[in-house]
Amino acid sequence: MSFISPQWPSPKNVRALLTTRSGGNSKAPYESLNLGVHVGDKAIDVLANRAILRKQLPAEPIWLNQTHGTLVSTPQSRIKVINDVIHADAAVTNNPNEVLVIMTADCLPVLITSLDGSVIGAAHAGWRGLCAGVLENTIAEMLKLSAHLQAQELIAWLGPAIGPEAFEVGEDVVNEFLGSNLPSSADYFKPINGKPGKYLANIYQLAHIRLEAMGLISISGGDRCTVKEAKEFFSYRRDGVTGRFASLIWISK
């Protein structure tokens, strides 16, 4: 099995973990540590893969049904969940050993913690959710849980996503960002020669500008590419039918 520990200045009581695609039971095209139950893989293999991951964690992760939206799952909202299905694209907690998890295969996973280790968050920032404000909503819910904190006391880690040399988008995506009420920049969309109306988008920089606007100063990660690193990561853009890897964070007791 193969796991990655994020490199960021997190407090000692906050743990984070990133899975790769190796070390599991799934067969092609999901080989091998696919954690997504919604992608067409055999359920028995996915459950076995999740059991492998569970051995690294203090509790079962809070799995989300991600919808490319901006809803944030909070400890209070989870009390009202029916049938254990949580429809959200981010989660926050201030409870020890509650494991937050985001699954991706090109979209940007963002892990956030306070410097004092009192509150954490995890967000699924595909371009739609990022444009609509999923990061802003996540930070807002974190600050509600720890009213004594300010955004400057939060730090973020940007996990593996589709890189700026691979993320081709149309003019509609560019216009969505530039027309939103949240910070964006045309500098993060590079026109592609010979492809009118097509651009290479830098999702890492688009996330950076949003986090910085919220007040965050320390932002780590953002240096991997799921499309190019085929041995390490699943990529929907590269393969079409593929698995999902996970980015996880929790407050240890």
Image: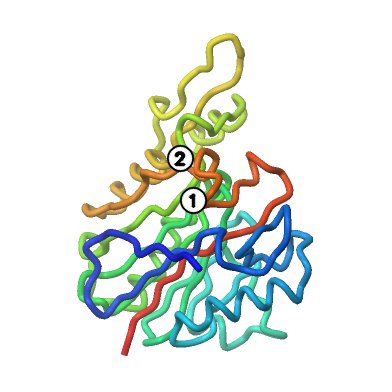
Residue indicated by mark 2:
203
Residue at image point 66% right, 65% down: 36
Residue at image point 49% right, 71% down: 91
- Vertical comparison of 253 with 122: above or below: below
Task: Residue 68 in the image: state x and y as whole percent.
Answer: 61, 54
In the image, is 111 to the left or to the right of 196?
left
Identify which amino acid the numbered label 2 is placed on.
Ile
| Picture quadrant where residue 41 is located | bottom right
Task: Residue 105 in the image: state x and y as whole percent.
Answer: 58, 52
Give yes or no for contact between labels 2 and 1 (Cβ–Cβ under 8 Å). Answer: yes
Tell me the CA gap for discs 2 and 1: 7 Å
Depth order, front residue of 94/76: 94
Residue indicated by mark 1:
108
- Vertical comparison of 29 with 229: above or below: below
Quarter holding the C terminus? bottom left
| Picture quadrant where residue 182 is located | top left
Q: Secondary structure at mark 2?
A: helix
> Could you say which disc has been placed on residue 161 in the image?
none
Residue at image point 21% right, 60% down: 152
